[in-house]
Amino acid sequence: MEHDSVTITNCKVTGVINPFLNVEGILFDEKSVFDVVIDGNHVSFNYAVNGNRFAITKVLSAKDNVIKIYLLTKGDKKNLVCTIKNRFLSRAKNKVNEVFSTYTHTRSTKNYINTLPYYNPFSKEEYLRWLKENDKEVEHNDLKYRPLISVLIPVYNVSPKWLSLCIDSILNQTYDNFEICLVDDASTNERTIKCLKKYEKSDSRIKVKYNKENGNISKATNDALAMAKGEFVALVDDDDELDVDAFYYVVDALNKNKKLDFIYTDEDKIDIDGKRCEPHFKPDYSPDTLLSLNYISHLCVIRKSLMESVGGEEVGLEGTQDYDLYLKLVEKTENIYHIPKILYHWRKIIGSTSMSLDSKDAITERTLMSINNALKRRNISGVAEQDKKSMYYKIAYKFDKEPLVSIIIPTKDYADITDQCLKSIYDKTTYHNFEIILVNNRSEKEETFEMIKKYKGRYKNFRVVDADMEFNYSKINNLAIKKSKGKYICLLNNDTKILTPEWLNIMVGYAMQKHVGAVGAKLLYPDMTVQHGGVLLGLGGVASHAYIGASREDCGAYGRLAVPYDYGAVTAACLVVSKDKYEEVGGLEEDLKVAYNDVDFNLKLLKKGYYNVETPQVELMHYESKSRGLDTSDKEKYARFRSEEKYMYKKWRKLLNYDPFYNSNYSKRWWFVLEKNKS
């Protein structure tokens, strides 16, 4: 079912004995509010959001009959988006093994929560428990540098209740050198005007401009910018709230580095009952992630002169005006800083923001325009596309002529597995200009040599390099790359199978970008669950793959399994990089024979200032370690694994302790969850 602001993808009742309501869908407005009615009675329910995907869940009684889900829109209008009947036979038919991922589902009963070692940030109840456990008094440093911050707030017909909470949250800041620049965009609600006039008289730091004609949010924000006297400006919506220490943390960061131009923080939402929910724990600056979605959002504090240099916000791009602004700002400065603290609270209500609710098609069109305009400004050949599953975005980079790609595939026997890999490349790949270098590492079986003979006779772009040495993944690949002819290198395991025909087009397109180092792909187990969705540094030790075991259809938190994201590392089971950058960092570290050589390689690229990108729209099957066994399968391999693990800690301890692309609030034992306080 569809409404202008929501699409319902699943609506059912499960559980033969204990009925359980599960409604899932896609949001097109972050402040959507739902109402659940059972047999004519309004009821409470659990609500979880993962990016723009949501889930409504509730434990039902067998006596419950008709369940209706409504979307509340402007003017308190109710739109029916889903109706389902609670029938025993239907529940029996729908019965499944209910295993809820910590990312997309929540079942908030006391027993369920207590059995989990972590908190699910997308469960309101669990997030509130985490907040309570981590509510600590802030120790304030002496701030010698105290710049004036001008808070820009466009206002339009907002309820005085929400406007007052917004302004009060600023007036109550522990850092007091600020001014509030409010621009009323010709509100017709007299109560809104009255509220503004009250605050205007109450504090000399509050300045209000009353526009006679409605110009929409971009113009109103620019009007507020023109009023501002501060060295920095902060963007705030008229119904949202700031943490009491928001400006303190911003200015504290500026005292440590006065060159900062662009500072952003983590954020969450406030529901209609005033409860905090749906936290967004963000990565540090991630340029490719930013081209996939506006992950920066709020709170955002910008050097005023920088915002003025790009002309403020673009009139005509309402709905994506902040995103468009951020894309322009990052082109002008590298002094970008992320504060990993929840310092901004969106209010989840319809009809109280300074921006009117536009259709999802209009917002999509403007977002695509903003991204495509950024590509043009940067002289990059490419086109933004919307991912229809996650509703986020990805770039189709263009090139006039396909550069030669050398695909390096080490193997030792296992002809059947290697043959499957080679066949998938030749049968599936739409990219034409590639060579395959099969690195023969002491193969012994006749079927291996028969397979090699077959491909040599069939394809001119297939050749073999002999690596007559004990297994050393790094040395074997380095040897082959010295003999390669390609401008780009693709490291590929022989136990993989291509699933996405355009895999090289996509990965080479990203690898061609000046700022990009290594490019990875989504790898799937044979049961079509995720084996690799990016590498998180320091997780469970040195590093760990994200989303192991997730469904192939899972979009991941904020689209991480659907659209490109910057990661600390990507696996070399399928990795594309320019040969120049490969050689610039010295290739793979030959002291790391088996484990972590790809992580080390990625970190060397990071150290040089490059960004490593995961492209989950590219999918391959991976029969992991099929041809050589696991690193811990015997004492000798385990000893080598531990030795290489120690090497990584000694060389990269700082990055392993702080992954800039994985928020420090998240657990280091499991991905994208919050640790419980053991005390």
Image: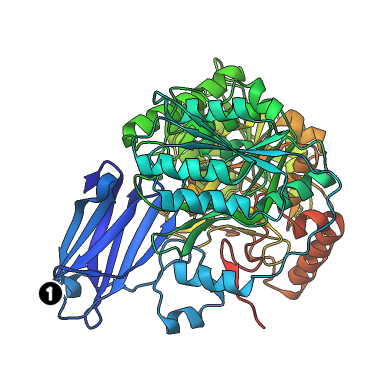
Give the residue drawn at x 49%, y 29%: 220
- Residue 463: % across, % down: 63, 33
- Residue 63: % across, % down: 15, 80
Give the residue drawn at x 39%, y 23%: 213
The residue at the far top in this view is: 400
Question: Neighbour class for label 1 at 10 Å: few (<14), some, many (≥20)?
Answer: few
- Residue 575: % across, % down: 63, 42
Q: Looking at the image, which is closer to me, 24 or 502? A: 24
188 on left or right of 434: left
* One can see residue 554 in this view: yes
* One can see residue 523 in this view: no
- Residue 441: % across, % down: 70, 49
Count of marks placed on residues: 1
The kind of residue on which mark 1 rests is Leu
- Residue 355, quarter of picture: top left
Q: Which residue is mark 1?
A: 89
| Quadrant position of the C terminus in the picture | bottom right
In the rendered image of this protein, does residue 657 appear above or below residue 600? below
Label 1: which secondary element: helix
Colour scheme of the rendered structure: rainbow
The residue at the far front in this view is: 201
Give the residue drawn at x 73%, y 44%: 177
671 on left or right of 649: left
Q: Looking at the image, which is closer to me, 315 or 94? A: 315
